[in-house]
Amino acid sequence: MTNGKLKALTQLFHKHMVKQYLPLPEGEGRFWRRRRKKKSQGEGIKKFLHLTFVIFNLTLILCFSAFAEALPIITTVSGGDAGLSRVLSNIGGLNLGYVKEGSREVYNLQWQPDFKLGPFGLGLNVNYGLGDFKPVGYETVVVRYLKYDDGRQGLQYGVISNLTWGHGLLLKNYTNLIAGPIMLNNSQLAFLGYFDNKDEGYVVRGLWSKTGVAAARLEERINDRLTFGQTYIADNDGIVIGTTGINQKISAIGVDATYALPLGFEGYAEWARLNNYGSGMGVGVGWDHSNPLADASFSAGYRLLDKGFVPGYFGQDYETNPIDMTTAEATGNNKNGYLVEMNAQIMKMATLRAAYEKYNDSTLASLNADATARLPQNVDVTGYYHQPNFNSFRSISLEDGAIIGGSIAYPMNQFTKVVVHYKKAYDPVAAQVVSSQYYEVRFSF
């Protein structure tokens, strides 16, 4: 480890942890003495134990890091092309973290093993925390995924992210992650499975989330160019609207068709109905291109919607900021509008995804974007912005459901990284904007 890297880690550690417990400079002694008088002896012991825990674990990781160059690499990568089962088998992921969410905080030592045996895979988060006020959703053992996939059939239990069926008129970028917790917990998990009968030319898919969302889909390959899809989805438990407290239960059906065109283009049409609220339809065109240097895709569509229909109702906002259907119907007008999306990846060093959606009965739109990049010295940076009620490129309205966040991962050596996570979002349960920070040192071997 170079002196510069060690100095950077020391400064980060001092800024976010040690600084909270060491005495202030001489000039601030009077304020510090007054503050100390207000602290009970029990709180002082807790602070001392917190600091001892952090120093011990940080020293442990730094000692391992100092000898990392001499350690053998014991991770292996599985072979084959079995889709979801192509995972990294890693028994040595170790993170030292500091989590702060509002007034709640905890020092966390986390082990992240990944195991693979043939088509089977398992990933866990094992947490050991020190602190009386742990963040909401903090759990000791969390199943990140448990799955089986042989290329023709698969079943996964775990985190579901960015799930889209058809062209997104019903199910668009759905995730079962909930608002608030910056750390994963077991209430954020779901089942996702499929069966691909290649001989008969059809695929069956299914989804069930612990939050009550259940869905099924049948895809039929008519020929090499034409594919039909049929979807049914429902929330058996319903979703509570934060502003009214109403438990909103909705089921829906949809059909879609996709036709492959020359030069990487495709045309599509889809129709969907939210039962008891109305229906909508859309047509559009997409394009996809890939080469050794870059991948890119683009799609644009036009939609005609009944007054009570909400496109992509089961989307990435569904579990965190659901749409109030009473408000959606309030205008009494049919809604027509457009959707534009783009994705790009350059040499696996940078990615960008963005989507903009606008309808003619509203002054608001929806904007979503996220990006990742690998900077010099293998520094990894991520960022995301999501705004369901977007009205200006100059403003971010967290109270209206915006979510912003990102992370920076700085490598100390090939086995050790210092990572800072940040998230700021409106929590409908707490009825306020909540900021979360998570600082960690990752050690893997």
Image (cartoon, grey):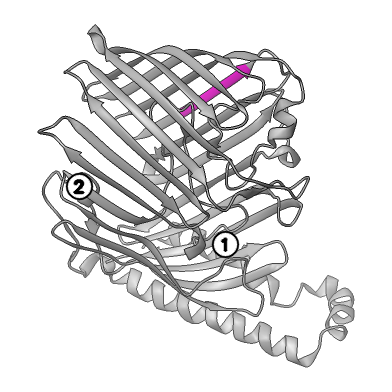
- Quadrant location of residue 437? bottom right
**Relative to 2, is 24 on the left or the right?**
right
Tell me if residue 342 can be seen: yes
Which mark, residue 11? 1
The secondary structure that most of the magenta stretch takes on is strand
Name above or below for residue 121 compared with residue 316. below
Confirm whether the magenta stretch covers residue 231: no
What range of the chain is rendered magenta? Answer: 353-358
| Marker count (numbered) | 2
- Quadrant location of residue 41? bottom right
**Relative to 152, is 139 on the left or the right?**
right
**Label 1 residue SS:** helix
Q: Amino acid at mark 1?
A: Gln
Q: CA distance from mark 2 to mark 1?
A: 50 Å
Q: Residue 388's spot in the image, x, y percent?
A: 64, 32
- Quadrant location of residue 198? top left
**Relative to 369, is 417 on the left or the right?**
left
Near mark 2 (Cα within 10 A), the count class, few <14, some 14-19 or many ≥20, is some
Residue furthest top in the image: 262
- From the image, tell me which residue sits under label 2: 153
Q: Residue 15's spot in the image, x, y percent?
A: 63, 63
Q: Residue 314's spot in the image, x, y percent?
A: 53, 38
